Image (cartoon, helix red, strand yellow):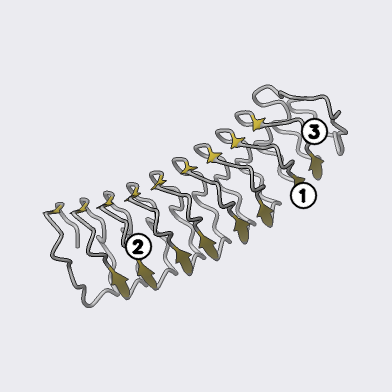
């Protein structure tokens, strides 16, 4: 159904277990979708560039959102992901510019590279306790993001994960964290407060570069490596 630009609705059968990559890509008039209970994965670019898509009902069977599945779906305003979900692929919600809120499930273990990058209306994120690693640039350039709650399970924050989140003012990093990636909070120009955990051993290159509102920071005794241009 790729580039069926006049398609407004689709009824999918309960027997459906697989939908191929890009199946509904560029269906620019599609406004809503109810996914069947038989579906376990959303394929790559499945709804990419569906610019009118405002509502998606996910089945409880879904375990994976594929790469770029909702990329540039700029009519999506909120998203409640099912409890069954364990992984979000790279670029999955890239440039969903109207997305203001997303509810992440407790079983989620993976958020891919640039998964929510440039979601410029996203205001807050609560990362689930199941999450251990956050992909590179996962929330980069989310310019309305003011609050992030980190789980105690998180051990690594990827390169540029929150780069250019220009309204983020404070961060409390969890006691489980051991590594902070290159440029993780670079260009967060309103960031005034950062609490680093005693578990942290490495701060990557440019991790806080151009954080022009930061006036002080207490570095933990556990720290063994600070990258170039960190501050």
Name the residue that disc number 3 marks. 5
Q: Earlier in the sequence, mark 2 or mark 1?
A: 1
Tell me where residue 191 sits by quadrant.
bottom left
- N-term-proximal mark, 1 vs 3: 3
Residue 150 image-quadrant placement: bottom left
Q: Quadrant of the N terminus?
A: top right
Q: Is residue 97 left or right of residue 114?
A: right
Give the mark nearest the N terminus, 2 or 3: 3
Identify the residue shown where x is 73% and y is 25%: 2
Q: Within 10 angstroms of label 2, few (less than 14), some, or many (20 or more) residues?
A: many
- The percent coordinates of residue 177 (x first, y second) are 30, 56
Specify whether residue 53 is in view: no
Residue under pointer 2: 174
Which is in the foreground here, disc 2 or disc 3?
Answer: 2
Position in image of residue 41 (x %, y %): 65, 31
Residue 4: image location, x then y, percent = 80, 28
Q: Nearer the viewer, residue 73 or 55?
A: 55
Q: Secondary structure at mark 1?
A: strand
Which one is nearer the viewer's eye here, 137 or 49?
A: 137
**Image vertical order of residue 84 relative to residue 205, above or below:** above
Q: Which residue is mark 1?
A: 55
- Cα–Cα span, label 2 and label 3: 46 Å
Disc 1 vs disc 3: which is toward the camera? 1
Residue 109 in the image, given as x and y percentages of width and height: 48, 44
């Amino acid at each position: 159904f790729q580039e069926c630009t006049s398609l407004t609705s689709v009824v999918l059968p309960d027997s459906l277990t697989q939908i191929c990559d890009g199946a509904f890509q560029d269906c620019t008039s599609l406004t809503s979708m109810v996914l069947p209970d038989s579906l376990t994965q959303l394929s790559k670019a499945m709804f990419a560039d569906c610019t009118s898509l405002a509502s998606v009902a996910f089945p409880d069977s879904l375990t994976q959102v594929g790469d770029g599945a909702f990329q540039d779906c700029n009519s999506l305003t909120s998203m409640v992901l099912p409890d069954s979900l364990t992984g979000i692929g790279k670029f999955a919600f890239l440039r969903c510019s109207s997305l203001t809120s997303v509810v992440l499930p407790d079983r989620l273990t993976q958020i891919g590279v640039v998964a929510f990058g440039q979601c410029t209306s996203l205001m807050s994120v609560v990362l689930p306790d199941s999450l251990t690693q956050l992909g590179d640039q996962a929330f980069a350039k989310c310019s309305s993001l003011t609050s992030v709650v980190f789980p105690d399970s998180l051990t690594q924050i990827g390169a540029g994960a929150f780069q250019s989140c220009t309204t983020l003012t404070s961060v409390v990093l969890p006691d489980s964290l051991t590594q902070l990636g290159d440029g993780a909070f670079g260009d967060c120009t309103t960031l005034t407060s950062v609490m680093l955990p005693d578990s942290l051993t490495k701060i990557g290159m440019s991790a806080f570069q151009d954080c022009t509102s930061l006036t002080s920071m207490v570095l933990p005794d556990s720290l063994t490596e600070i990258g170039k241009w960190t501050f």
